[in-house]
Image (cartoon, helix red, strand yellow):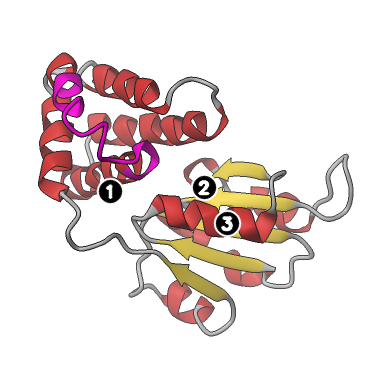
């Protein structure tokens, strides 16, 4: 079974995915996959059994691979496509929307996007200053939600220029997302570390 979870509210989306898959699952970054990886993911078995639980993150950014999803709708595994942004104009989306469940999680319209934009923009030039700005919102903002907003801003930046730095920022955010889920370190500390690294990306 394949389900799509999309939208900028990553907190709610992650909760829905956890409800769908449970606690133990595999994670693959879609941007790093190739078409020949799909048979193993969708049809292959693991050492722990024949049924697998899998998250594929932002596979929609890898168009050549995403387009092949329609060939694996009969997968015996539970697979969640976790898409920050999904192109609803694409032929693949139009083909999938009537065949699998698509769950969309949007952020409240009163979210302070401007502050996130300012912190992200500042971090690209001066990580320490961005960390200082972050202190103002720590008590009122959820770190996972904030990281999702950072990711949205990075995607917008990449869509605008598609430069090397913008691409590296997306990879760093992908690592941040993994660390926020798996690391025992404080979530805000992980975010601060990302903001400090952002200015040094080339």
Q: Which of marks 1 and 2 is nearer the N terminus?
A: 2
Which residues are the magenta region? 130-145
Q: Of helix, strand and loop, which one carries label 1?
A: helix
Marks 1 and 2 sit apart, C-alpha to C-alpha, by: 17 Å
- Under tag 3, what secondary structure? helix
Q: Are marks 2 and 3 in contact (CB under 8 Å)?
A: no
Tell me if I can see residue 49 in this picture.
yes
Question: How many neighbours does mark 3 have within 10 angstroms: few (below 14), some (14-19), or many (20 or more)?
Answer: many
The circle on residue 186 is: none
> Could you say whether the residue bearing mark 2 is in a helix, strand or loop?
helix
In reply to whether residue 129 is colored magenta, the answer given is: no
What residue would you read off at disc 2? 30
The answer to whether residue 62 shows anywhere in this view is: no
In front: mark 1 or mark 3? 3
Q: Mark 1 points at which residue?
A: 152
Q: Quadrant of the C terminus?
A: top left
Which is closer to the viewer, label 2 or label 3? 3
User: Which residue is label 3 attached to?
Assistant: 17
Q: Which of marks 1 and 3 is nearer the N terminus?
A: 3
Residue 101 appears left or right of 131: right
Question: In terms of depth relative to the viewer, which is nearer, 95 or 22?
Answer: 22
Residue depicted at x 39% and y 64%: 105
Q: Distance between the residues labelled 2 and 3?
A: 16 Å
User: Residue 138: within the magenta?
Assistant: yes
Rendered residue at 17%/59% (across/down): 110
């Amino acid at each position: 079974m394949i389900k799509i979870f999309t939208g900028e509210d990553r907190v709610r989306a992650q909760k829905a995915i956890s409800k769908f898959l449970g606690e133990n699952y595999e994670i693959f970054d879609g941007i790093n996959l190739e078409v020949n990886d799909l048979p193993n993911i969708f049809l292959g078995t693991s050492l722990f059994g024949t049924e697998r639980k899998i998250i594929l993150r932002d596979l929609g950014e890898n168009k050549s691979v995403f387009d092949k999803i329609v060939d694996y709708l009969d997968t015996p595994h539970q697979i969640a496509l976790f898409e920050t942004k999904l192109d609803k104009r694409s032929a693949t989306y139009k083909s999938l929307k009537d065949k699998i469940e698509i769950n969309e999680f949007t952020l409240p319209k009163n979210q302070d996007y401007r502050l996130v934009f300012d912190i992200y923009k500042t971090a690209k030039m001066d990580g320490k200053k961005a960390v200082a700005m972050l202190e103002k919102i720590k008590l009122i903002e959820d770190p996972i939600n904030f990281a999702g907003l950072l990711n949205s801003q990075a995607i917008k930046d990449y869509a605008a220029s598609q430069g090397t730095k913008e691409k590296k920022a997306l990879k760093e955010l992908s690592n941040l997302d993994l660390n926020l889920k798996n690391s025992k370190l404080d979530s805000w500390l992980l975010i601060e570390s990302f903001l400090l690294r952002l200015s040094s990306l080339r």
